[in-house]
Amino acid sequence: MLKKTPLNDFHKVLNAKMINFGGWEMPLLYNSVIEEHHAVRKTAGLFDVSHMGEINISGPKAKEFLQHVITNDIEKLSEGKILYTVMCYQDGGVVDDLLVHKVAEDFFMLCVNANNTLTDFQWLSENQITGTRVINASAENSQLALQGPTAEEILQNIADIDLKEIEYYHFRTGKTAQVETLIARTGYTGEDGFEIYCKPDSAEHLFRNILEAGKKNGIMPVGLGARDTLRLEMGYALYGHEIDRNCNPLEANLAWIVKFDKGDFIGKEALIKLKESGLNRKLVGFEMIDRGIPRAGYKIFKNCNEAGKVVSGTFSPSLKKAIATGYVAVEHANIGEEIEINVHEKKRRGKIVKTPFYRHKKKNS
């Protein structure tokens, strides 16, 4: 039986097209992927992301424990700040990518990927040290994501705290539509916005009130379809595509969240060896020159020889062209280099480009 978020019935009231997403019944779209995508880029969109997992780490040794299991450095992370990181296996493979919220000196909330929640919880429990407590708090939380240029204006209508005081990758607690919430200035769309945590029995009330508050702004509920096109335009990694058990953060362009100088952490030795020996492949972004949309699993060729494979691909509503990410042999991972993708058994030309694919236009001063 599929798992359901507290908003499941309300999605159906809104005539959402529901799909099986990693064992969850989730909305793919409400109107159309393109309409919802543009709503986020131009005004605002509201997502139900209550399938995401939350794991609490607490105790006097909580910080020491986290330093050992993540690649990034939380030593200077102050209360109310958020850190993006990955956890690695001993061989450097990625357990998951996640957000670490520092609630207090001895208490951290991790937001993890829905499909990996149990894996992450088990991994953390297996590596737990004395003086820490690891709790899977996913059932105690729901999460909504309000994203877009008018997100702050909309949410301020019903929030009792000054949202301008919440900087990027920071969070605060307060009431939203009279509901106790944790409001984080984070998101996976490339737009300004917030990820809002509340108790499950308040999720529908909050979702309805945010939609009402954003009516004049043209807010739309947004499903997983547009969530994927938005994140791919920004070149953001998605577990199971750009990153997984069989890849490492160095080849996935996530070296910036691997802090070798912070002390020991799980996977450090393997990653140092990979760095010293040189990578065999690299994650790149490319756009299509010929017609055709590259999809995950399609083979990539260079000079008629197989050189890699696509891990994510879509038609970009913002750029009006097909874009994709893929792993290619490092000698071919050069900006501007042409490659071929096997689309429906036909070779189609593409060109490696710098990511993010989508960049905001500069406003006239």
Image (cartoon, grey):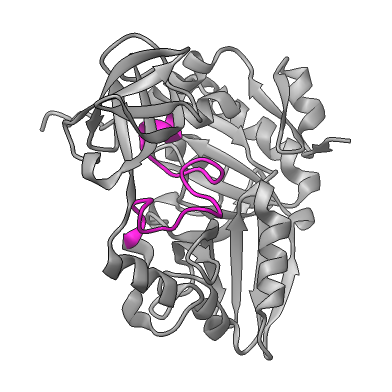
> Does the magenta portion include 317?
no
Q: Residue furthest right?
A: 1
Q: Quadrant of residue 140?
A: bottom right
Q: Give the range drawn in magenta.
A: 230-255
Classify 28 as above or below 96: above
Residue 165 shows in this picture: yes
Q: Quadrant of residue 322?
A: top left
Q: Where is residue 319 in the image (x, y as percent from the top left)?
A: 30, 19
Q: Where is residue 233 in the image (x, y as percent from the top left)?
A: 37, 31
- Using the image as rendered, state which of residue 252 and residue 234 is in the foreground: 252
- Using the image as rendered, state which of residue 141 and residue 225 is in the foreground: 225
Quadrant assignment for the N terminus: top right
Q: Which residue is drawn at 46% across and 62% down?
A: 85
- Give the side of residue 354 with respect to residue 24, left or right: left
Classify 7 as above or below 27: below
Classify 91 as above or below 64: above
Classify 105 as above or below 186: below
Q: Which residue is drawn at 53% across and 37% down?
A: 146
Q: Where is residue 290 in the image (x, y as percent from the top left)?
A: 29, 11
> Does the magenta portion include 253?
yes
Magenta: main secondary structure equals loop
